[in-house]
Image (spheres, rainbow, N blue to C red):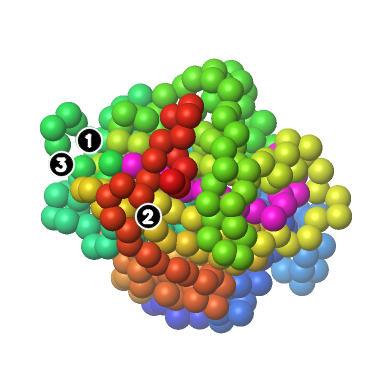
């Protein structure tokens, strides 16, 4: 089915939500025509009284669909199925670990068979970290490309290793530290977190030994050496985000650890969005691979607002053929990561450094910190 890409109609499911509104604005600024979708017709009409609220059955008049409506454990499946019927790409902003794992597990084969691109977690959590890690490791090897294609047939899932023992790996360890000045979550973030917590029966999850593992260990408090101007900050270790699904979906890695500044974690636990102001953020990535260390850092403002250009840029690249494969793909697997990040230079400031072996040490409790 041939589609003409240009001033395209892009469906946004959950258009009236906090992130959805950012996505709609981003689409309009780039010359696209958003098709407003959602479960609440009154909210859709309040957003644009002249718009005719559409349903998932209207996706046949869209070039692509961006799903911004969580919890994604509830919405991702139906929207992906509708996208496959309409034969259009699907992109979402899911941060839920289990929902992302489900998409790889349940839709990889159908999407690949249909020749459709499905990109979950194209957001601040999950997508940005994956792009940064992939960029730090530069261009994938032929073996990595083969594993990326194979991941559509053998998708990553909890407890399933991404690389067999003895198989070449892309990185020994990946560490992603999120330095947020604050975090007043939206109702959607809170609802999605509650669903994930119930699905894992209150247990925590980490990616270690090449697989996802559930555990009940308390989260350690550490000091992370964020670069200036943020500087060292107290963080919670094993504050696991969607990166533990997206990164191992295409990179063979033994450990993926994520950290969150203690104050932001405290804000999230309070679950209060009143007085919400855009936070500043630093995403600091450290990768150990083959005896070397690489560090790449992204800084910016407002984790929800920056999600919009991530998702819209992904859609534009898919529609213009700048995507590496079909099926369910993470951001790093789908796109040229360095080029993608350069396209967001007006939203993100990047700093890249490469160190040598020995600059990274294990802290007491088994988590990383600088010597």
What mark, if any, has residue 133 been given in the picture? Answer: 2
Q: Position of residue 285 (x, y in %)?
A: 44, 53
Asked whether disc 3 touches disc 1, contact meaning CB atoms under 8 Å apart, the reply is yes
Q: Position of residue 92 (x, y in %)?
A: 51, 52
Quadrant in the picture for the N terminus: bottom left
Question: From the viewer's perspective, is the residue at label 3 or at label 1 nearer?
Answer: 3
Residue at x 17%, y 56% (from the top left corner): 141
Q: Quadrant of residue 343?
A: bottom left
Q: Position of residue 103 (x, y in %)?
A: 42, 40
In the displayed structure, would residue 161 be above or below residue 190?
Answer: above
Asked if one can make out residue 330 in the rendered structure from this viewpoint, the answer is no
Residue 283 shown left or right of residue 333 in the figure? right
Q: Residues within 10 Å of mark 1 (few under 14, many from 20)?
A: many
Residue at x 70%, y 59% (from the top left corner): 279
Q: Which residue is mark 1?
A: 163
Spatial separation of the CA atoms under disc 1 and disc 2 = 17 Å
Closer to us: 318 or 156: 156
Queried whether the magenta region covers residue 176, the answer comes back as: yes
Q: Secondary structure at mark 1?
A: loop
Q: Secondary structure at mark 3?
A: loop
Asked whether disc 2 touches disc 3, contact meaning CB atoms under 8 Å apart, the reply is no
Q: Position of residue 94 (x, y in %)?
A: 54, 46
Residue at the far front: name it: 371
Residue at x 37%, y 30% (from the top left corner): 208
Q: Secondary structure at mark 2?
A: helix
Queried whether the magenta region covers residue 139, the answer comes back as: no
Find the magenta span and give its range.
173-190
Mark positioned earlier in the residue sequence (2 or 3): 2
Q: Which residue is mark 3?
A: 168
Closer to us: 69 or 45: 69
Spatial separation of the CA atoms under disc 2 and disc 3 = 17 Å
Residue at the far right: name it: 275
């Amino acid at each position: 089915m041939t589609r003409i890409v240009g001033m395209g109609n892009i469906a946004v499911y959950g258009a009236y939500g906090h992130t959805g509104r950012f996505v709609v604005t981003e689409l309009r600024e780039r010359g696209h025509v958003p098709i407003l979708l959602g479960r609440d017709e009154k909210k859709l009409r309040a957003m644009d009284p002249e718009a005719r609220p559409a349903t998932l059955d209207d996706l046949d008049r869209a070039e692509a669909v961006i799903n911004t409506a969580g919890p994604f454990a509830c919405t991702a499946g139906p929207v992906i199925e509708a996208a496959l019927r309409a034969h259009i790409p699907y992109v979402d902003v899911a941060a839920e670990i289990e929902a992302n794992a489900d998409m790889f597990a349940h839709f990889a084969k159908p999407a690949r068979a249909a020749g459709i691109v499905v990109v979950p977690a194209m957001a601040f959590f999950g997508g940005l970290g994956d792009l940064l890690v992939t960029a730090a490791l530069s261009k994938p090897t032929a073996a990595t490309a083969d594993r990326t294609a194979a991941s559509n047939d053998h998708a990553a899932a909890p407890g399933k290793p991404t690389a067999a023992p003895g198989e070449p790996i892309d990185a020994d360890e990946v560490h992603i530290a999120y330095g947020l000045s604050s975090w007043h979550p939206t109702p959607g973030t809170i609802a999605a977190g509650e669903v994930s917590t119930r699905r894992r029966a209150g247990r925590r999850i980490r990616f270690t030994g090449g697989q996802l593992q559930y555990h009940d260990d308390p989260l350690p408090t550490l000091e992370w050496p964020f670069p200036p101007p943020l500087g060292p900050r107290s963080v919670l270790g094993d504050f696991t985000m969607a990166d533990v699904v997206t990164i191992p979906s295409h990179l063979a890695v033994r450990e993926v650890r994520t950290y969150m500044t203690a104050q932001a974690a405290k804000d999230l636990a309070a679950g209060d969005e009143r007085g919400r102001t855009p936070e500043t953020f630093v995403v600091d990535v450290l990768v150990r691979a083959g005896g070397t260390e690489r560090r790449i850092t992204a800084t910016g403002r407002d984790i929800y607002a920056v999600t919009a250009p991530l998702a819209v840029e992904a859609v534009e690249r898919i529609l213009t053929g700048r995507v590496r494969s079909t099926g369910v793909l993470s951001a790093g697997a789908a796109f040229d990561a360095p080029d993608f990040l350069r396209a967001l230079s007006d939203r993100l400031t990047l700093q890249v450094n490469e160190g040598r072996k020995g600059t990274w040490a294990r802290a007491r409790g088994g988590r990383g910190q600088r010597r």
